[in-house]
Amino acid sequence: MKTQLALDRLTIEDAIRLARKTEKYIDLIEVGTSLIKEFGMTSISRLKEAFPDKEIVGDIKTIDNAIYEFDLCFNAGSDIATVMGVSPLPTIEACLNSAAKHGKLAMIDLLNTSPTQRDALLKYKDAIFCDHISKDEQEMSGKKKSIDRVNYDPSLKWAVAGGITVDSIKRMIEPRPHILIVGSAITNAEQPEKVAEAFRKIIG
Amino acid sequence: MKTQLALDRLTIEDAIRLARKTEKYIDLIEVGTSLIKEFGMTSISRLKEAFPDKEIVGDIKTIDNAIYEFDLCFNAGSDIATVMGVSPLPTIEACLNSAAKHGKLAMIDLLNTSPTQRDALLKYKDAIFCDHISKDEQEMSGKKKSIDRVNYDPSLKWAVAGGITVDSIKRMIEPRPHILIVGSAITNAEQPEKVAEAFRKIIG
């Protein structure tokens, strides 16, 4: 299991500082959607420049205009770029084709997909699937939604995201995901490096 | 009926130049998702600075992290910001609340929403609804999808987007939308001002 540090609601400088503090314990660095929308592609190129040996995930959340957005993201230095599972299928297929062309990967974010949509997506064997409880759902629904892994084919690569803490990962049932996406549990901690280290110890 | 000029896949300078050429004939200026993701909030603030008297639409396509993204968008100078109809409802409600707080508007993009999702969204009477055939669907599906307006309550404000040309607007059935979103028909034209003028003449 790898740890992906999601950097959101930060300046680029603070994002670099946080990644620097925790880099020993993390595998992938995610340039969050909020950084992309606030600062543009500079956010990706600066993080890649600062961490050339880490895999950079550009959380661009494409939902249309796939080729243009994925080209932007990969050309700026992303190794992985995200597309929304709720997009029309031509968008998802264009993202996968773009990733293959660039020799990179696409991550399909399953946020708010219906069971039918999920079933239709599972044929894209080259993608990483991300089971995702959104920030807004965590904060506003009043009830904790749980990650649904019923339909996963074990031959697929998958990630989980959404309010994951050191405690919740301890309770996580098997099979564990390939990638654990952790954001505020690390970025809002007083000592981010200690929390990142705690995740590393648990997930091994 | 108002015309919204959608500016996508352009530098900020070219976006300003195109809007300047056509400003006599357009009502709203949309800072496209591709400009936001490429250049960040600077794209919105520079367009608002160049056109302080036009309504600026920030096509930020929020699907999570609603309050943060809508604050960014309105603080940069947007008068209207977009949220995806396929988002979880807490996200859409947070966007509407943010718009109300800022004294601005939210546009709900109905791209790829199911009939059930559309029905659930129509209760948000303060929103502008955007019926939207995506760029990728236009280019890759091989068949022209048509805008579905069956369920529209005439008391709602709505917009249409997706490959609209001077010819297609002539064929548009009643009732016409409040906002017609036009992108490449104007931005890719050899004489954008002539095409914008042609739209203005047709829609009156």
Image (cartoon, coloured by chain):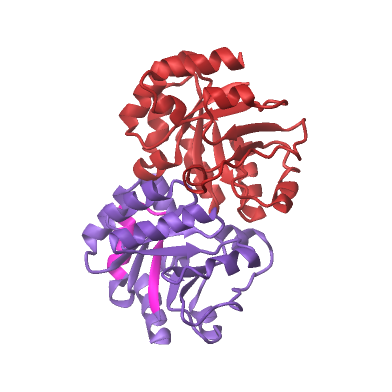
Chain colours: A purple, B red
Based on the picture, tell me whether residue B70 belongs to the magenta stretch.
Answer: no
Point out the stretch of residues depicted in magenta: A2-21
Residue A130 vertical placement versus B148 (above, below): below
Q: Is residue A45 visible?
A: yes
Q: Where does the image place residue B152, in percent across and percent down from the top left?
A: 75, 37
Point 33% across, 57% down: residue: A14
Q: Where does the image place residue B142, in percent across and percent down from the top left?
A: 51, 46
Q: Give the number of callouts.
A: 0
Point 54% across, 64% down: residue: A110
Q: Residue A96 or A175: which is nearer the viewer?
A: A96
Q: Residue B89 or B99: which is nearer the viewer?
A: B89
Is B142 displayed left or right of A26 in the figure? right
Residue B26 vertical placement versus A163 (above, below): above
Q: Residue B68 or A48: which is nearer the viewer?
A: A48
Residue A152 vertical placement versus B11 (above, below): below
Q: Where does the image place residue A113, in percent across and percent down from the top left?
A: 60, 62
Say which quadrant the C terminus of chain A sits in: bottom left
Asked which quadrant contains residue A202, the reply is: bottom left
Residue B127 vertical placement versus B87 (above, below): above
Based on the picture, tell me whether residue A12 belongs to the magenta stretch.
Answer: yes
Q: Where does the image place residue B157, in percent across and percent down from the top left?
A: 69, 31
Q: Is residue A191 visible?
A: no
Is B31 displayed left or right of B106 in the figure? left
